[in-house]
Amino acid sequence: MVQFELNGKLVTVECSPSERLLDILRSQFFLNGPKEGCGEGECGACSVLINSRLVNACLVAVGSLQDAKVMTIEGFCHTERYQMMEDAFAEAGAVQCGFCTPGMIMAAESLLSNNPHPSEEDIREAISGNLCRCTGYNMIIHGIQMAAEKGTGLW
């Protein structure tokens, strides 16, 4: 049995400690924002924040989460920072099919919470673990830049 905070609520999970966080999020909590992409930590589709650090949920064993704080896109979307980012991504045309969007948003949140005024190089590095097959990265980078500019004081 593992107990951790998920999107601000204390939860208890009974499963094998080696079970992947991604599988638990989707099957037990019905959180479908983190997605199975590659299953190897290469694509970022399953990105979540654990103790405010960006991680790939497909690589995290649930047993390692005792007393951790896990935030998925479903928890983050209730914040003012998310709204700012969503608006900036939409204005920049940084969203198309939406498959990579939750992971990109979580990567952007991780970056901006540590560096509210990132350079383009900082942004490129921050999203380097997230793949997008639709928009190309320029619009996503522009969306993050816009969020940083508009969100002054939020991060």
Image (cartoon, helix red, strand yellow):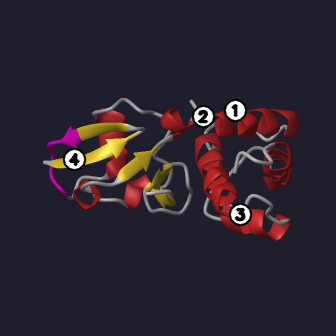
Mark 1, secondary structure of its residue:
helix
**Badge 2 or badge 3: first in the primary sequence:** 2
* Residue drawn at 24 percent across, 53 percent down: 19
- Tell me, yes or no, whether the two marked residues, 2 and 3, touch with CB atoms within 8 Å: no
Q: Earlier in the sequence, mark 3 or mark 1?
A: 1
Q: Which residue is the site of mark 1?
A: 83
Where are the magenta residues, as a range? 12-17
Q: Position of residue 49 (x, y in %)?
A: 48, 53
Three-letter amino acid code at the position of disc 4: Gln
Give the x, y percent position of residue 57.
41, 53
Whether residue 37 can be seen here: yes
Q: CA distance from mark 2 to mark 1?
A: 7 Å
- Precedes in sequence: disc 4 or disc 2: 4
In the foreground, 23 or 91: 91
Front residue of this view, candidates 144 and 40: 144
Q: Which residue is mark 4?
A: 3
Q: Which residue is mark 3?
A: 115
Q: Do the numbered discs 4 and 2 sit on residues whose CB atoms are within 8 Å?
A: no
Residue 71 coordinates in the image, percent (x, y): 46, 45
Residue flagged by tag 3: what amino acid is it?
A: Asn
Is residue 149 positioned above or below 76 on the image?
Answer: below
Query: Which is more N-terminal, label 1 or label 4?
Result: 4
Is residue 96 visible from the viewing direction of this image? no
Q: Is residue 14 magenta?
A: yes
Return the residue at label 2: 79
Position of residue 5 relative to residue 91, above or below, is below
Secondary structure type for disc 4: strand
148 and 108: which one is in front? 148
Tag 3's secondary structure?
loop
Per the image, is 23 magenta?
Answer: no
Among the 4 quarters of the image, the one containing residue 102: top right
Within the image, what quadrant is residue 126 found in? bottom right
